[in-house]
Image (tube, grey):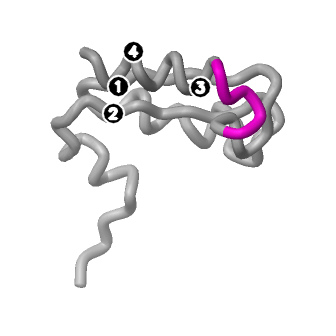
Amino acid sequence: MNDWSIEDRLPLIHVPTFVINGRADIAQDFVVAPFFEKIEKVKWVTFENSSHTPHWEERERYMRLLAEFLAL
């Protein structure tokens, strides 16, 4: 077994990654920031009118941004 944390492994991700959180999410910006900082190809969106479920709370915007991301 090794001592690696998930943050230590983030630089190993080499595929485009879509990171999201909501402004009222328990996963606040300081929680999500390491994913943005340590993954090579990442897009990060904070949904201003959501908690932990922007795919439900801001569905239209989420689906549009997800479609744009997948089209890259």
The residue that appears at 77% across and 29% down in the rendered structure is: 23
The amino acid at mark 2 is Thr
The residue that appears at 23% across and 84% down in the rendered structure is: 1
Which residue position is annotated with label 3?
A: 62
Residue stretch rendered in magenta on the structure: 56-60
Mark 3 nearby-residue class (10 Å; few <14, some 14–19, many ≥20): some
Which marked residue is nearer to the observer: mark 4 or mark 1? 4
The amino acid at mark 3 is Tyr
Q: Is residue 51 left or right of residue 44?
A: right
**Was residue 15 drawn as part of the magenta stretch in this picture?**
no
Which residue position is annotated with label 2?
A: 17
- How far is disc 4 from disc 3 in space, using C-alphas? 10 Å
Nearer to me, 33 or 49: 49
Quarter of the image where the C terminus is located: top left
Q: Secondary structure at mark 2?
A: strand
Q: Which mark is residue 68?
A: 4
- How far is disc 4 from disc 1 in space, using C-alphas? 13 Å
